[in-house]
Amino acid sequence: MASGAHSDAQLNVGLLYDIGQGVAEDPVRAVNWYRQSAELGHAAAQYNLGLMYVTGRGIEQDIAQARFWFSQAAGQGLQQARAMFPESGGKSAIDAAGAGAIEDNDFIRSLSGASTGTAWPVAANYAVTSHHVVEGNDEVMLYDAYGLQLRATVVLRDSVHDIALLRTSDEGGLPPALPLSRVPGRLGSKVFTLGFPRVDILGRTPKLAEGIISSVNGYRDNPANYQTSVQIQPGNSGGPLLNTAGEVVGIVSSMLGIVRGSAEPVTMASISYAVKIEVLLSLLQSLPLQAIMTETRAGSTAPLADLAERVQSSVLLVVAAD
């Protein structure tokens, strides 16, 4: 077995134990598998191992070790790892993550057994997320970036396209709706998302990831999806995929994990998928007319930092408890 495929397999086993998918959640075993993959030079495993050291999950907290593994991953160009270091002085995201892990312990414990994801307002009293985030739940809780919580009801499900619409009863409780692009995304165009990946480790502030539309069709050329290079993690599902004008062009849905073929299984770390906004626009036709008419409009193209500032108050953490 080639060392690259071997480290991919070790990373995937670590992920399964980390999030409890198909096996009982076991952070100690997750650390062990991450370490084996990280020592073979796998950037994603190095990053995940750094996260475990930051929070002391599955291993004793050690910020120095976290910095070491993040720096290894950052040296290989992993975007999330680079984001853990300040651009010019100040408190690093590593320190903030470590502090947040302690300060938010009660909230993190309350997420045990719950499904989490990202949502965003699409019209007055309506928000959108991924169907798989809220599957099996009629009601969910929404949290904005400032901790304000709202109860929402799942009013429409599209399991085929992995979309769910949520409605809040609190008039005016949702932040401003995000504008929807009326122009399809183009191959090679820049896109970004804001969401809540791995809240249990990274905390409740929105996290940004950027990339390009790398294909105008999704998995196995699914015409309803885009393929992107935006690096996402569990918790990003349901988040908005935005263009450089701050308009939503898609709904973040999934990342490509284990790929099996004639060769050894491999992990495609920089491939993710988003449902095209045209699918959502069709779904919105079932909403009341007045809800559609409250949709906001985007401004002109702006620097990424300005766009992030404009959008971040409108992304919401979704918590769907079993």
Image: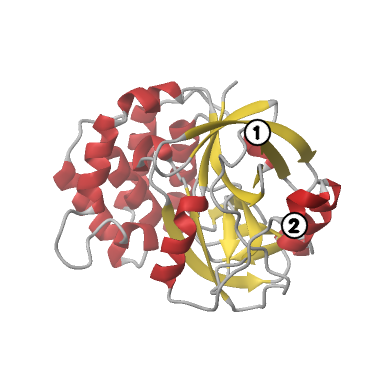
Q: CA distance from mark 2 to mark 1?
A: 26 Å
Residue neighbourhood size for the residue with mark 2, other residues' Cα within 10 Å, grouped as few (<14), some (14–19), many (≥20): few
Left or right: 1, with 97 as reference point:
right
Q: Position of residue 110 (x, y in %)?
A: 43, 22
User: For this rendering, which residue is in front, 101 or 2?
Assistant: 101
User: For this rendering, which residue is in front, 58 or 309?
Assistant: 309
Camera sees residue 56: no
Q: Which mark is residue 293?
A: 2
The three-letter amino acid code for the residue at tag 2 is Met
User: For this rendering, which residue is in front, 184 or 66?
Assistant: 184
Residue neighbourhood size for the residue with mark 1, other residues' Cα within 10 Å, grouped as few (<14), some (14–19), many (≥20): many
Q: Residue at coordinates 18% horizontally, 45% vertically from top-left?
A: 65
Give whichever of discs 2 and 1 has the lower sequence position.
1
| Colour treatment of the image | secondary structure
- Element class at badge 1: helix
Count every numbered label the image shows and give the total: 2
Q: Position of residue 1 (x, y in %)?
A: 49, 53
Left or right: 115, with 82 as reference point:
right
Q: Position of residue 232 (x, y in %)?
A: 50, 54
The three-letter amino acid code for the residue at tag 1 is Val
Left or right: 216, with 115 as reference point:
right
Q: Which mark is residue 134?
A: 1
Q: Position of residue 115 (x, y in %)?
A: 56, 31
Q: Nearer the viewer, mark 2 or mark 1?
A: 2
Q: Residue at coordinates 34% horizontally, 51% vertically from top-left?
A: 47
Q: Residue at coordinates 36% horizontally, 46% vertically from top-left?
A: 48
Viewport quadrant of the C terminus: top right
